[in-house]
Image (spheres, helix red, strand yellow):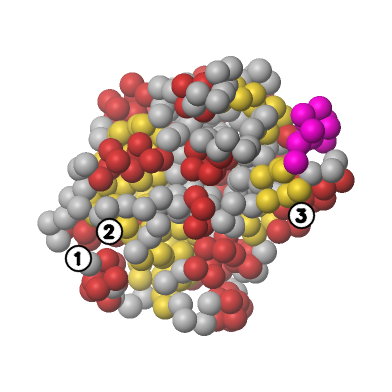
Amino acid sequence: MGAAGRDYHDFLTVFEDREDAEVVAFTRAPGQNLGELGGVDRRFPSALAGEGYPEGIPIEPEERLAELVETHDVDQVVFSYSDVSHEHVMHAASRAMAAGADFRIVGPDAMMLEASVPVLAVDAVRTGCGKSQAAGAFADALADRGHAVRLIREPMPYGDLVENRVQRFASHADLDAAGVTIEEREEYEQHVDAGHVVFAGVDYEAVLDAAEAEADVIVWDGGNNELPFVRPDLHVVLADPLRAGDETSYHPGETNLRRADCVLLNKENTADAVAPVVENVREVNPDADIRHADSVVSVPDPDRIDGARVLAVEDGPTLTHGDATRGAAAAAAETYGAAARVDPTDAAVGSIAEALAEYDHLDGVLPAMGYSDEQIRDLEATIAGVDCDLVLAGTPHDLARQVDVDVPVVDVGYDIDLHEGSFDDLLDRYDDRLGL
């Protein structure tokens, strides 16, 4: 049971070459958008699945789980995706067991790869905590020390899986050539703009080999709240006081929290509930080094926002499955004196209108969703239909490169500001662990 990421990794590391096991299907999570190739007949290709699967492996909708268990006489269902509540996981377990199968979650020792260079992993308890900003800050600090740093990002393989077996992004031209989705750009582009090379893909043993060939240290930038695919020498995990309690109620975020060497509480400048999060961290991981930080927004020309009517476009996953009501663009609107944030609901079209209806917790903001060319066109049409003075783009990619609208687009940056010391100071604290 997956969502086009951890499920493929679990297969390739745990099941691919086993003579005593046959994987009969992958299921895709409800609402999972697999991009242009997202039809129900999509398959995990034989070129990746190996000699035991000459026809590949079908990828089926998750609602067919019970039917698949019965049809294929399935012995075991493996849960392999992230950022879902503990209750969600046990509902999945109940469905599998009611159909007659065992239920399993693959643990870290079975799926983590071993690297030949030091690995600093940055993960989170939920999506949208700011882990990519932290990963980028660590990469900057390591590069400033003269290290050859390569980032490895958790997969988002929405296109051709064989072609995307190993992906390397060092420039905007690389991103354009790969035809990556807006969601992928939100994760890769910020690192590329900072001068770092990012690796991702489908086959993470091959991804790791490619990164190790260029690096003397690897920074793992996790996706959602997923576990690292590569065993870390230092594991930093972010928590979000704006969603207090989620750190111990989501899978596999709680596992990350319990395994963390350092827990970084971000966004404290806008949170009211820091103490309960500290208490939860101390309860499940009393030895963790707890650090505190603010998420600080910035724009190139604040005067353009003062008194303007703005549309706030935010990082897509943070608002959707991350359950956040708003993000950096809304924060910038308040910080720099916007006259109003215009609600995009009435202007929304197509898949964007459907998304706003599904995620009705949103506070008058627009998620930057673009998993396919059609959805990007819907996003563009929605933005064009909003009566506003400017668009605040709180997504970590260049929105203006993806949509063509008449209204000006102002990029909102956001960085992690540690309360004590710097990311370079944190590296000093863990020099021995990283062997640098």
Query: Toward the viewer: 26 or 412?
Result: 26
Evaluate if marks 3 and 2 touch, with contact meaning CB atoms under 8 Å apart.
no
The three-letter code of the residue at mark 1 reads Leu
* Residue 42 seen from this side: yes
Label 1: which residue?
A: 436
- Residue 121 image point, x, y percent: 38, 58
Q: Is residue 32 magenta?
A: no
The answer to whether 400 appears left or right of 192 in the picture is right
Q: Which residues are magenta?
A: 65-75
Evaluate if marks 2 and 1 touch, with contact meaning CB atoms under 8 Å apart.
yes
- Residue 39 image point, x, y percent: 64, 19
Tell me what residue is drawn at x 68 percent, y 33 percent: 27
Label 3: which residue?
A: 90
Q: CA distance from mark 3 to mark 2?
A: 35 Å
Quadrant in the rendering for residue 414: bottom left
Looking at this rendering, what residue extends furthest in the left direction?
Answer: 146
Looking at this rendering, what residue extends furthest in the front direction?
Answer: 19
Tell me what residue is drawn at x 67 percent, y 30 percent: 25
Name the quarter where the C terminus is drawn: bottom left
- The 10 Å Cα crowd at callout 3, few under 14, some 14 to 19, many 20 or more, is few
**Which type of secondary structure does the marked residue at label 2 adopt?**
loop
Tell me what residue is drawn at x 12 percent, y 56 percent: 146
Q: CA distance from mark 2 to mark 1?
A: 8 Å
The three-letter code of the residue at mark 2 reads Pro
* Earlier residue among tags 3 and 1: 3
